[in-house]
Image: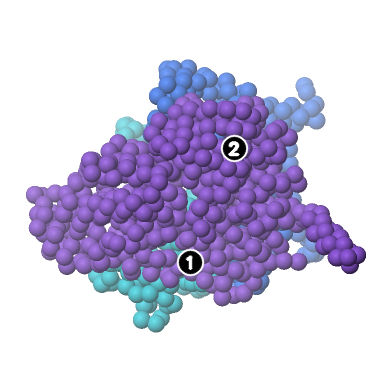
Chain colours: A cyan, B purple, C blue
Amino acid sequence: MMRRALVLAAAGWLVLIVLVALFAPLLSGADPIQPVGPPLAPPGVGFGLGTDALGRDLLTRMLFGARLSLVSGLLAASLAIGIGGAAGLAAAMQGGWIERAIIWAANALLAIPGLLLALMLLAAMGPGVRTIVLAVGLGGAPGFARLSRAAFLSARQSDFVRAAHALGAGKRWVALRHVVPNAGTTLLSLATTQFAWAFLGTTTLTFLGLAGNPSLPEWGAMLNEGRVHLINAPHLALWPGAAITLTILSVQLLGNWIARRQDGGAVRRAAMQAGS
Amino acid sequence: MRLRVVLAALMLASAALAACTPAAPPSGSLVYGLTLAPTGIDPHLNASSELGIPLSSVYDTLVFLDPKTGDFVPGLAERWTISPDGTQYTFTLRRDVRFHDGTRFDAQAVQANIDYTLNPDHHSQKAAFMLGPFDRVDVIDDFTVVLVLKEPYAPLLDSLSQVYLGMASPKALEAWGPVDYQFHQVGTGPYKFVDYVPNDHLTLQANPEYAWAPSVYTRARPAIESITFRFFTDAATRAPALESGAADIVGEVPPQEAERLAAKGGFTLLPVTIAGQPLQYLVNTARPPTDDLEVRKALLLGTNRAVIVQTVFGATSPLAQGPLSANAMGFLAGSPLPGYDSQEAARLLDAAGWTLDPVSKVRTRGGQTMELVVVVPPWGSNPEVAQLLEADWARLGVRVRLETVAGFGPLKEAQAAGEYNVIGVNLFGTDPDLLRPFFVTGGSYNWTNVQSAELDRLLLEGSQTTQDRSSRAQLYLQAAELIRDQALILPIRDYVNLVVANARVLDLHFSAQGWFPLLIDLQLDS
Amino acid sequence: MVSPSDRPAAGLLTAAGRRALDGLLTGWAAVSVTFFALRFAGGDPVASLLAQGLASSEQADALRRQLGLDLPLIEQYMRFLGGLVRGDLGRSLYTGQPVTRIIGEQIPYTAQLAAAGLFVALALGLVLGILAVGEDRRRDLPLASGLAGIATALPVAFTGILAILAATHLGQASVSDPAMVRSLGLPALVLGFASAGAVARLIQAGMQETLAAPFMLAARARGLRRGPRLLWHALRPALPPVISLIAIEAAFLFGGTVVTETVFSRPGLGRLLVGSILQGDFPVAQGLVVLSALVYTLSHVAADTLGLILDPRLRPTE
């Protein structure tokens, strides 16, 4: 019962921030970069969530921040899922030396911790939000390749795939028509975890000050700005920090629920074990 | 008769006693917080003002600038004369000075230091330029040296009063070379250089042999035995460091935090005005749309500078009024900048052909959107100021792209690439000649890309007028008016360094340049 | 026929050997990826120095020759590998100091923090995991397992900030001064807390699996009551996967230390890495990435080998 309530709450939060991200300009009349009042105003007195150090409305910045943070996380996750998923599928379907090469490459890349891989790319290409998205996306690809390969493999072992092969179907056709849909729910669960990881990655990198543009209303960057005024005005850091945490928690809860619903989590667990 | 003799003897005795009373040996230690991690800390070669904070107590200079009178007083040089044509400076040096490694300071040392600074392979970023149109050093005898210039150069004494032309041991310079010397610095100052780990710490230790303190120092010998400098490049860490006792003195404390600490008790807030250029933004005349004078004027009028200063700095900083701060030599309060007038700014932009699109709220001209690239350095609250500039200009319908760079090196790199309309940079110094590299044609800091024969003439004459201070000031006033009329700069605030010290720290004084603490004067309340 | 008692030792050695070789190859691959990625994606570090006025064009050319940037890429790669084997990671672009020295100066700080964080992760994870075993999801409030779940979701940045807030209000001093050992407490707690969740889950899963096994039921039938001895018997088989997890967590720990060091403003490799990225000190950044790739691979190999030793079930059957 409790679990169900939690999952509903998680879904509700995610729906809320997606709506907020879509309709941010309508929900708040103000411009996130324009000062609207005295700096460091506390929440409540005229400004819903208070103002930041330059007098900008925190509620507006949180609303627009939802947009930026979510989009960055989604783009990075999509990159990781796209590249990693394609590699995982190729490995699972082709087998042989292709599979060995892909596994080996993924392992090599995984030897470099994800955040480090992202930082390395930023070292080479210079700071910036686009680079952050690219870096986090590429950094997540090897891990997703390994996990998705396990999921595709186990889907490939299923009965109707074998039947399709027996009937003479070609590999690519089998892949698209049977393996991918079969692995679907496992993939969905893996994808949600990937999104949580990507979202954490992009907000961490902006938190470290690697976004390049200081006025960006983005939750990670706002969390960093809040550090200077932690004692005077803790609400500057609390709103973005809580929002980031709730988002990650919700995505994880939802991912767990999806996994549990489908197959008791067995395939997912197998994938995770194979992946580690 | 005998009474008189006795009295005289007593007076002599007490005088002798007073002269001989040994000062208490230096004791205690303190931690001083630095706020920038320079890429190099050799004052002969590197330009950072942060390096001067510890190192101006490791080195002595030929002359010192008295912050109260604005005159130059003897340092390592006992006296000096300037030739009538202003090209020859003859210095008579003290004979009793020893470097920290025991070697003697003499005229040959002066020559070695200047050679080291001017060596083209060493790429001195500041000190070499401070010597101006330098010709050569003539060593007359062991303690007489002549610095010969190709042309008169008024700022020379001011240059020689700064740590960048401090005197280092030639033996150490020779032994370590330009790359490693910064880790093994040897001077003659009240503090000895012990060790340096970049971005971690730098340690100084009192020099027990120090006996040649200039009159700008209150004490003759250091009171504190050991001073450790730690880096607090992250602004969020400075107030907590003071509160936790991790640092005893920290500069550049964020304004709200400084005020909080001052109100809290147990801390002293010392606002120190820094002479030189104000926190400012240079406007690039070589890149559209800022190549248009009307656009530049509009930007100046459309910037609410007073509100920006109030928001970011509170009441701690005065609004800047020109290319030099109010306390710099050569500033004349004659030509204030126009105040905030967004309507006039909008009118100027309309007249220049940039019309406001009612839907996108951005101005366009011939299908092109009006976009400005602003390059922002990370120090001195520049990012906060830049964000408010963006807000002001967005209201005018100008789209702004902010790009922060991580340090001075990346700033120069971005500038060299040329893709900027507005860039933030300012140098500090007590001589108004520091404007010259910024505004003469081809100057090394001419980031506005201005080419004005009139400015060239005014600034050159200013550098050569050695005799008459007020006529020199007039030249700079005219230059300031030209700069204002061409809308080349957006001056924001006169730099005030908010230094906060633990209440047990006494006698924290700063040099005439503002950045450099006189460590020898410091005492700890016991 | 070989006696059974000889076989496990031989099996262990080959398995360990294979793991080591695998680790070596992976490490080499990771390092190579680093090299090529940085070369392709990055700009010319010498041009950067030129633009900053730190070098004349002759010096730039000399520096290019010295760094080998004028050589074909393959040769540069060989020089890089050669230098790596010798322990030479190049020199900082700005200070000219050897990268190994620069990194070496910062290692103690990060190592301290990582070790303390790992200790916290294990201790806290163990406690939470054991507590979670006894929970009945349907009736009790799953506090311990819930806490474990939240621990993994909380970004270290936020936990760190909350911790600083709490510490300030409670009057705690000096979280950033590395000279004071007690200043390590809070950052280590924050760092370890995030990993503790994963450790707790593994322990809980492993113990529950063991508790349901037939030999356990038999033991309990023989009179082994619920208590510390039972827990210990259930705990032992659950430990080997935790060892493996430590290796994976080493990766997280690295990322976590970067953020923790930033939040608490402590010196260390994290600050060095972010700083060298922002300043464009390319050799230092490269050296750090290479080093951590090697350390990560090594810890994986070590963890796998340890796992082999501790848990016979993981050994290859002949």
What is the number of the mark on residue A41? none
Q: Quadrant of residue B318?
A: bottom left
- Name the residue at 64% across, 29% down: B142
For residue B259, side relative to residue C109 (left or right): left
- Name the residue at 48% across, 46% down: B158
- Name the residue at 52% across, 68% down: B257
Q: x and y percent of residue A267 in the render?
A: 49, 49
Query: Going from the N terminus, do you reach mark 2 or mark 1 first?
Result: 2
Q: Mark 2 falls on what kind of element?
A: strand
| Residue C207 seen in render | no
What is the number of the mark on residue B255? 1
Q: x and y percent of residue A207 in the render?
A: 46, 55
Within 10 Å of the Cα at label 1, are there few (<14), some (14-19), or many (20+) other Cα atoms? some
For residue B313, side relative to residue A177 (left or right): right
Q: CA distance from mark 2 to mark 1?
A: 46 Å
| Residue B72 seen in render | yes
B211 or A129, nearer to the observer = B211
The answer for which chain carries disc 1 is: B
Rendered-image quadrant of the C terminus of chain A: top right
* Front tag of 2 and 1: 2
The answer for which chain carries disc 2 is: B
B297 or A265, nearer to the observer = B297
The amino acid on which the numbered mark 2 sits, given as a three-letter code, is Thr
Q: Which residue is the site of mark 2?
A: B92
Within 10 Å of the Cα at label 2, are there few (<14), some (14-19), or many (20+) other Cα atoms? many
Q: Mark 1 falls on what kind of element?
A: helix
B324 or C20, nearer to the observer = B324
The amino acid on which the numbered mark 1 sits, given as a three-letter code, is Pro
Q: x and y percent of residue B106 in the render?
A: 64, 33
Furthest toward the right, the residue is B2
- Name the residue at 46% across, 20% down: C62
For residue B132, side relative to residue C148 (left or right): left
